[in-house]
Image (spheres, rainbow, N blue to C red):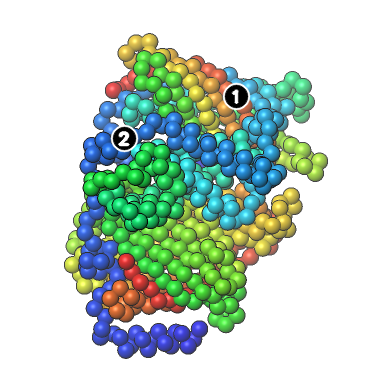
Amino acid sequence: MKIHLYLFTLMLSSFSLFAQTSNSEALISIKGTVISNIGEVKEIWETGSAIYLNYENISSNQFSYIFQTGYMKFKENPNHEFQGDDAYFNIIPIQVGGRYYILANSIRPFLMAMSGMNIIKSNYPIYRTNDEGEEEIVLESGTNTKLNFQVGLGLALELFSNLQIEVLANYNSHILDAPIHYNLTGLEVGLGLNWVISN
Amino acid sequence: MKYISIIFILTFLINQNFFSQSLYNTQKDSLIGADTGYIPNQELVEKMNPRLPLWLPIAEAISVNLLLGGFNAFIMNSEFAQISTESIKHNFERGWSTDADELITNMWMHPFHGSVYYNLARSSGYNYWTSLGVATIGSWQWEFFMETEPPALNDWIMTSYGGSMLGEMFYRFSNLILDESATGGERVWREIGAGIFNPGRLFNRLITGRTSRVTNEKLYERQPFLGELAIGGNTVADGTTWENGEENLMFTMEVFYGKLFSKRSYKPFDYFRFNSAFNFFGDQPVIGQFRIENIMAGKSSKLGSGRFLYGVFGHYDFLQNTVYEIGAASVGLSTGYRTSYKSKTQFIGLLHGAVVLMGAANSDYVPEVEFLDSARTYNMGPGAHFKLETILSLPFGSLSLDYSFWWIHTWDGAMGDEFITVVSPKLRIHLYKRWFIGLEYLLYSRFGMYEDFPDRTVHNNETRTFIGYSF
C-alpha cells in the first residue's frame, strides 16, 4: 500500500519536470462498462460492471496520457456457494496510462494501456486450490490494495467540436496475489462520453 | 592482500609530488572540463533519417519473439516454448504471475532482451518514451503468447523498463562509435562495433541502407563522457574477516556520460553513470556488477558559487558474487550539489530516493520454501532504494564514497522483507597521463525479517585493488 502511495506522490511531484507540449488537448471522460471474468476467479465472481472518470491529455495528435479512477462491482457466480447472502467484491481503481491514436481524424481508433492500484473491498476471502490439491487464501476479506493492469482498444467518434463518444474493449489482468497462477482476469466492454475542456 | 595495500601506500607517498592531474577536474579530458556535446540539427536528422512508421518496430519486436520462440521450440526443444492456442488462452485466463528463473535470467538477461526491442524503436526515430512503449508491447506479447508458463510480471517490468535503461545506454554508446563519413575497413568495424552494443539498430541500419551510406553530415547526438577501464584483484570474504576469501581477477568499466549540473533542464539519459565489474579465473560469476543510474528529467540552477540539481532519476542495479545477489529496477527523485568548476578541490554529491518497481535479493531460506524451484536463491518483489554518492576531487586523485540501500518486500520467496546496504569508499590516485591506481572497499550488509523463519543479519567484506586507464 505504501509503495503505491509513494509512486503516486512521486508521479505528481515530478510532473512539472517533464516537458509539456503547447498543442495539447485536454478531455474529461465518463465511461460505463460491463465485465465478464475469465479463469478461476469466474467460478466465484462471474460478471461485473464499472464506471470510470478520467482526465486525458492528448500531447500530440497520436499520444495521450490518462489519469483514471472509478468503481467496479462484481456479481457472484450463481453456482458458487457463499457463507452468507451479504457477499460483495468491489474495487476502486486508481490508474495512470496512455493511448496511441492510430488515426487523427474525427473517427479515431486507439490502443490503450493502464496500470495502477486497486483498492479491493470484499467480505469473504478468496481461496484457490494449489498444485498440491490444498486450498490457500489468495485474497483476505477486508480491504486490500493490489496492482492492476489493463490493455485495450477502442474508437472515439467526434459528435461536436467539444464532445466525443467512444466505445472500448479491455482485457484486465489484476493482481490478487503475485506468485499464484490465477488472478483477476476478465474482458470489459463499454461506452464513454468525452468532453474536450481545452485545446 | 596486505602486501598489495602496502605497495599502494608506498606508491601514494612516493608519487605525491607528481600528481598534476585528477579525475573530475578541469582538465580537457575530464568529465567536468570536456567540451560541450553535439546535438544535431533536428530538421537535418528528419531529412536524412526519416522516422519510420510505428507499426514497423512493433512488428519487428514481434518478429524477434517469433524467431526466438521458434528457436526455443524447434532447435532447443524447450518445454516452455511448446505453445498452442490452448496455452495462450490459459495465459489470458491466469493473468500476471511471477516466475522463478535464476537471478541472471530474470534481472540481467531480460533487460538485455528488452534493450533489443527498445532499440528497434529508438533507431526508427522515436524518443525514449515511445521506445519504452514498444519494449513494453514486445515484452507483453512474449509473456502472453510465446511461453506455456504463465505471464510473469517481474519479467515484463525488467524487460520493458530495465530494457529501456540498458537500451538507451547502448544507443548512446553506439552513437559514439558510428561515423558515416568513414569508409572501408574502418567503417565496417565501426558498424560492427555499434551493432554489438545495439543489434536492433544494426538491423534497422541494414534495411534502410544507412550502413553503406557515406555522408559528412553529423546526425547522431554525442555528449562528453569520461570512461575508466581498470584491471585488478578482488577478494570477497565470507564474513567480515580479511583473509578467508579467494582472490579473483576483476575487470571494471565505469562511464560518466553527459555533463550533470551544466544544463538548465534535462531529457532522459542526458546524463548517466554506468558502473560494471566482470570476473575471470575464479569462483565468482562473470558479471559481478552492472549498474546504471540516469537522469529522466531535471533542472539545474546556480546555488552560491556551486550548482544545485533536482530531478527524476532511474536506477538499474545488478550485483552478484558468491556471497550476495541484488537486482533492482527503480525510479525516483534525486537532488545534488557540486562546488564551483573553478575550485581546485571539488565536491559532487547526489542523493537519491526511489521506488523499486521490481527487485531481488538473496536469502538463505528461499530453497526451504515449498513449491519454489530449489534452484531459486533469492526473494523477489517491489520496494525502495536510497543512494548517496559523493566524490571529492583532490590534487592527486579522487576519493569517492557511495552508499546504497535497498528494501525488497517479498512477493515471491521466503515471505518478509530484505534490507540491504552496500557502503563503498574508493580511492583513485593519478599515476601518469591517463593512468591511475586505486583501492576500493565494499561492506555489504543484509538484514532479513521473515514471517516463517528467524531473522537473519549478514555482513561481508570485499576489497578491490586496480590499475586503470581513463578515456
Q: Amino acid at mark 1?
A: Leu
Write the residue at 62% across / 48% down.
Answer: B411
Whether residue A145 can be seen here = no
Residue A186, position in %: x, y? 62, 27
Marks 1 and 2 belong to one chain: no
Residue A32, position in %: x, y? 52, 18
Could you tell whether A115 is left or right of B195 in the image? Answer: right
Mark 1 vs mark 2, foreground winner is 2
Farthest top residue in view: A159
Please tell me which residue lies in front, B144 or B367: B144
Residue B210, position in %: x, y? 34, 42
Decide: is B37 above or below B22: above
Whether residue B453 can be seen here = yes
Could you tell whether A181 is left or right of A3 in the image? Answer: right
Write the residue at 39% across / 68% down.
Answer: B229
Disc sitting over residue B95 in the figure = none
Quadrant in which the C terminus of chain B is drawn: bottom left
Q: Amino acid at mark 2?
A: Pro
Subunit under mark 2: B
Could you tell whether A90 is left or right of B329 in the image? Answer: right
Please tell me which residue lies in front, B27 or B423: B27
SS at badge 1: strand
Circle 1/circle 2 CB separation < 8 Å:
no
SS at badge 2: loop
Report which residue position mark 2 lands on.
Answer: B50
Report which residue position mark 1 lands on.
Answer: A187
